[in-house]
């Protein structure tokens, strides 16, 4: 299960989603794909998120899963999400 870290603040701009970790003061920018993943949280698995991207963006499942796993890894390393 992947969940947003509840302390993270978000601001949705027209072409990107900005995440702010008030604990560290760091800001992160997500593109449209990242925004879709972020908005789909909480999610049971990376593959569930990839299936949503596959349908919404008309990409193949393998590409979607690779991109989702890379994004989840970066978000988790930055403590923006929690994995259970």
Image (cartoon, rainbow, N blue to C red):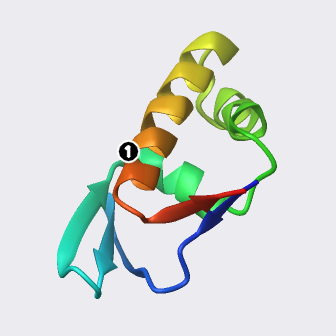
Secondary structure of the residue carrying numbered label 1: helix
Residue 30: % across, % down: 34, 54
- List x then y, in percent, for residue 11: 36, 79
Outermost residue on the front side: it is 84
As rendered, which of 71 and 29 lies closer to the eye?
Answer: 71
Residue ID at (53%, 20%)? 66
Looking at the image, residue 55 sits to the left or right of residue 66; the answer is: right
Residue at 31% of width from left, 59% of height from top?
16
58 relative to 23 in the view: left or right? right
Q: How many marks?
A: 1
To which quarter of the image does residue 40 belong?
bottom right
Vertical comparison of 82 with 66: above or below: below
Vertical position of residue 79 compared to residue 37: above or below: below
Neighbor class of circle 1 (other Cα within 10 Å; few <14, some 14-19, many 20+) is few
Disc 1 marks which residue? Answer: 74
Residue 17 pos. (x, y %): 36, 65
- Image quarter where the N terminus lies is bottom right
Quarter holding the C terminus is bottom right
Q: Is residue 63 above or below residue 64?
A: above
Please identify the quarter of the rendering in which residue 54 is found: top right
Horizontal side of 53 relative to 1 (left or right) equals left
Q: Is residue 32 visible?
A: yes
Residue 33 in view: no
- Residue 28 against residue 60 in the figure, above or below: below
Name the residue: 63% across, 23% down: 58
Task: Give the residue at x 18% y 81%.
Answer: 25
- Give how far across and how far down residue 37 sits, in percent: 57, 50
The residue nearer to you, when weighing 4 against 10, is 4
């Amino acid at each position: 299960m992947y969940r947003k870290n509840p302390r993270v603040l978000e601001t949705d701009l027209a072409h990107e989603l900005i995440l702010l970790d008030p604990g560290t003061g760091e800001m992160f920018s997500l593109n449209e794909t990242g925004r879709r993943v972020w908005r789909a949280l909480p999610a049971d698995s990376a593959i569930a998120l990839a299936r949503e991207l596959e349908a919404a963006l008309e990409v193949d499942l393998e590409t979607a899963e690779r991109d989702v796993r890379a994004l989840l890894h970066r978000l988790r390393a930055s403590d923006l999400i929690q994995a259970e």
